[in-house]
Amino acid sequence: MANHERNKRLLLELLKRPVNGRCADCGAPDPQWASYKLGVFVCLNCSGIHRSLCSRVKSVTLDFWEDELVEFMKSNGNDSAKALFEKAVPAYYYRPQEHDCAVLREQWIRAKYERMEFTGETKYPPISYTTGFYEGVLWKKGKENTQFLKRKFVLSERDFTLTYYNKEDESKGPKAIISIKDLNATFQPEKIGHPQGLQIIYQDGSHTRNLYVYHKSPEEIVTWFNAIRAARYAYLRMAYPTGSDEGLIPKITRNYLKEGYMEKTGPLQKEQFKKRWFVLDSQNRKLLYFKDQLYRMQKSWGSFSSAQRTKVTQRRSVSHSMVGESGSVALRWTRPSDGLSSCVSRRGSRRSGWMPSVRSSLGPWPRRIMPLKPTFNLKDEQQTGVPTGQRGEDFSV
């Protein structure tokens, strides 16, 4: 018993070191588990993945630790493991975070410790990351139904394109050629209904389109994801030759700040309210809405710019009067598709979290324009010429 308490105390002291204070794999704070085969401290979620890899795992506080295992942990630790297993991670390779989906975290752990892709001593990462060309089959959701069908995809870093074909016979030409310039990829397992579900978003003229795909192999879908990131990284390096990795890497792919349903009516505010899926893209400063969460093309979007944010100060009384006596929180922007002013009304916005998300995407607001129940006029008259007071579309929950 004395040895048990002493070893527990020694392990807790090791956890106080900054390098061991976060999970070695996902960065979650305060890890309470350890792989005594690898000598790393990990969180509960990552410990389950290590256990599935036959990596010996113990709880720091609940399990009994032999003296030799404690000594092994003392001589290793997260910093030593990182120097070995993450020695040659490409700049564009996605390092999963605490709240990322399971397939990303699992494949990151397998790539590091099982396949040893990043030690610099093997022919890893896979060749798709280094040649700039990758092709294969993905299961893609059909346009008019929920059925997923096999489709061939070809990724070319040389042309900066992602191409897919509806038929195996390529002589009939591709169904779509997507520019890497405007492409984003994000894992959406819950939305798509598959643990390896990937959403590919791209610009098609003035519209934003979505492809919903998956692969039955977890390793293959993560390979596709990182191959897309490799091509995006190459494009950004070309587009911004003086840019640093610190500035470019966050632009490779991104998750959206917030997604969810709201209800909207038309510009005359007389139509029946209909539920629509909204997406807040803080990096591109856009609020988009779709017919539903798996719809292929957005119905409309508003652009958030510094000029629009400045208009709030000038037009506070106008926009607040549009809220009415209901106390709804409103958000107004200009639709570039037709130049009309649009409005979102959120009842219960504090619970929904939409307005705080919008505010954070816009940056700091002057305190003097924050009423008790804020209304934001996000128009830009200089771009559209539409009068600020024009009534637009209402959205409410």
Image: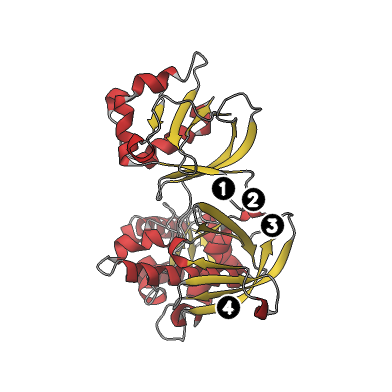
Q: Whole-percent x and y of residue 280?
A: 48, 44
Residue type at mark 2 is Leu
**Which circle marks residue 143 in the picture?**
3
Depth order, front residue of 339/126: 339
Q: Which is in the foreground here, disc 1 or disc 4? A: 1
User: Mark 2, residues whose alpha carbon is within 10 Å: few (<14), some, or many (≥20)?
Assistant: some
User: Mark 3, residues whose alpha carbon is within 10 Å: few (<14), some, or many (≥20)?
Assistant: few
**Which circle marks residue 294 in the picture?**
2
Residue type at mark 4 is Glu
Distance CA(mark 1)–CA(mark 4): 28 Å
Distance CA(mark 3)–CA(mark 2): 10 Å
Label 4 sits on a secondary structure element that is: strand
Q: Residue at x 35, y 56 (%)?
A: 13
Residue type at mark 1 is Gln
Report the residue marked by disc 4.
135
Q: Whole-percent x and y of residue 129?
A: 46, 77
Report the residue marked by disc 1.
298
Q: Whole-percent x and y of residue 219?
A: 59, 72
Q: Earlier in the sequence, mark 3 or mark 2?
A: 3
The reply to whether discs 4 and 3 touch (Cβ–Cβ < 8 Å) is: no
